[in-house]
Amino acid sequence: MRFRSVIYAAILSLLAFQPAAAGFSDCSGLATTRSFDGDRPVTVTFVNQTGAAIEIVWLNYRYLQEPIGTLQPGQSLVWPTYETNAFMFAADGVCHALFIVERRTSTIEIR
């Protein structure tokens, strides 16, 4: 079964990718966000629908950031993971949004 995830209103605004200099950031909880041990596998598809390169970073079980890759505009990435795992979206190394996987299979459209 496939679900489309809507990543709360802040991410929808953010995914227009306003520059960090404009004061937009929804990453105030970054220091305390991490993945939790999950036992339910999930396949997540990240889809970059912006005009900018987007970095996808896994926030591991010890609060460390592990880069997965950079999606160019129009690219997508299918990533096997687990429920309760956390990811960060960034542009030019600056955090713009956080996402925690909650569904079996999610397509996250980055706009």
Image (spheres, grey):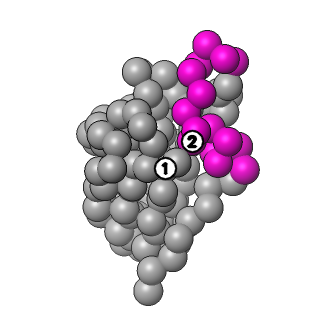
Q: Nearer the viewer, residue 19 or 104?
A: 19
Q: Magenta stretch: residue 73 in it?
A: no
Residue in view at x 72 percent, y 50 percent: 9
Q: Is residue 77 left or right of residue 99?
A: left
| Residue 2 picture location, percent across and down | 45, 80
Q: Residue at x 47, y 38 (%)?
A: 89
Q: Is residue 71 above or below residue 1?
A: above
Q: Quadrant of the N terminus?
A: bottom left
Counting from the top left corner in percent of width and height, residue 58 is at 39, 43
Give the prevailing secondary structure in the magenta stretch: helix
Please name whichever residue, 58 or 35, is drawn nearer the observer in this view of the structure. 58
**Number of other residues with Cα within 10 Å of mark 1, as a class: few under 14, some 14 to 19, many 20 or more:** many
Q: Secondary structure at mark 2?
A: loop
Q: What residue span does the magenta drawing correspond to? A: 9-23
Residue sticking out furthest to the right: 9
Query: From mark 1 to mark 2, how far is it between C-alphas?
Result: 6 Å
Residue lying farthest to the front in this orientation: 51
Q: Which residue is mark 1?
A: 110
Q: Amino acid at mark 1?
A: Ile
Q: Taking 80 as reference, is 53 above or below it?
A: above
**In the image, what residue type sits under mark 2?**
Leu
Mark 1 near mark 2, Cβ–Cβ under 8 Å?
A: yes
Residue at the bottom extreme? 1
- Give whichever of discs 1 and 2 has the lower sequence position: 2
Pointer 2 residue: 15
